[in-house]
Amino acid sequence: MRERHGPASKIPPGVDTSVPNIARVYDYMLGGTINFPADRHLAELALQIAPDAPAMAQAHRAFLRRAVRHLAAAGIRQFLDIGSGLPTQGNTHEIAETAAPGARTVYVDIDPVVILHTRELLASSPTATIIQADIRDPDHILKHEHLRDHLDFSQPVALLMCAILHHLHDHESPTEISRHLVSALPPGSHVVISHFHNPGSSRPDVALQATESERLFNEKLGTGRWRSRDEITSYFSGTDLVDPGLVYIPDWRPDPDEYQFRGTRYYGDYAYKSLTYHSWLGGVGRKD
Ligand SMILES: C[S@@+](CC[C@H](N)C(=O)[O-])C[C@H]1O[C@@H](n2cnc3c(N)ncnc32)[C@H](O)[C@@H]1O
């Protein structure tokens, strides 16, 4: 067991910390302190399958930061981040407000620990707030008074669904949920999506890692789907992918000033990317 974790604090009553939880497992992968032995145990099992998962988690946050900066530069001033996770370095509202002072952010998450810690972080923020809600009930989110108070749906909105749709089962219709949310956005809005990826028979080695990870997640967390490129593409329905399209996340508009995923080894002229590099796809779609 690695030693990166510190004392976890502030857990709302009724939360069973003996059961692993996706927000806290991810927090551990990112080097955070809001996690417990059950979370760390599952993370360590996941690391046996994908040893560079922490580097990939960092690369994923770097993708999110680049996407938010890109959208702020494109004039977006409103951000709706669903499945926002525990506060970490470079949260969406911080990136957005640094790039575009006055930008407004609404976070949404189902997890009471995420809600508690994010509310604490945002206690004095006039521009950012969090709503406790379930993405599987998109109408509840869209009609929520805090969302309507904070965001003006006559102006473009950036909808972030990063590392959340792979926690929906197929029967929960992630395509329909995404379509529903995107349909509520005004023209000029964008959607940012990242998702676990299984390339199938085109890369049996990556597919095996994806299948093993999926089995572990479902056994311990009850969710986790590594989907095909076509399935993930369907979540951008109603938008056009902006350049460079749906790509492995370190390759989405890489920035030399940002975190670089070091999963490449060179054998002479041949560059070998780690299996984990192929396990996340991300992109940004624009709604006209
Ligand atoms: C892996 S974290 C991703 C955090 C952040 N979006 C990122 O990409 O760095 C997934 C988050 O989705 C939240 N989540 C999972 N299922 C959800 C649901 N049905 N509705 C809302 N949030 C959900 C979890 O609580 C967790 O905080």
Image: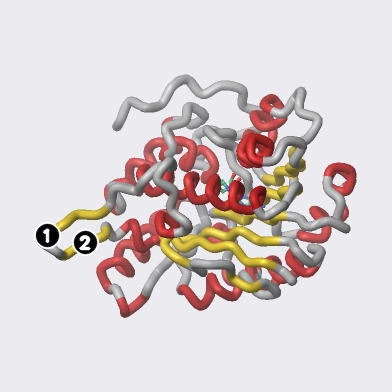
The vertical placement of 247 against 33, above or below, is below
Q: Quadrant of residue 276?
A: bottom left
Q: Residue furthest left?
A: 268
Residue 171 visible in rendering: no
How busy is the neighbourhood of tag 1: few (under 14 within 10 Å), some, or many (20 plus)?
A: few
Going by the numbered disc 1, the residue's amino acid type is Tyr
Going by the numbered disc 2, the residue's amino acid type is Tyr
Which quadrant would the C terminus be assigned to in this image? bottom right
Q: Which residue is painted at 33% across and 25% down in the image?
A: 3
Q: Position of residue 249 (x, y in %)?
A: 44, 57
Which quadrant would the N terminus be assigned to in this image? top left
| Alpha carbon separation for disc pair 2 and 1 | 8 Å
Q: Position of residue 2 (x, y in %)?
A: 30, 30
**Is residue 84 or residue 43 the one in the foreground?**
84
Horizontal arrangement in the rendering, residue 62 relative to residue 284 (left or right): left
**Is residue 270 or residue 210 the one in the foreground?**
270
The reply to whether the C-beta atoms of the residues labelled 2 and 1 are less than 8 Å apart is: yes
Pointer 2 or 1: first along the chain = 1
Circle 2 residue: 272
Circle 1 residue: 267
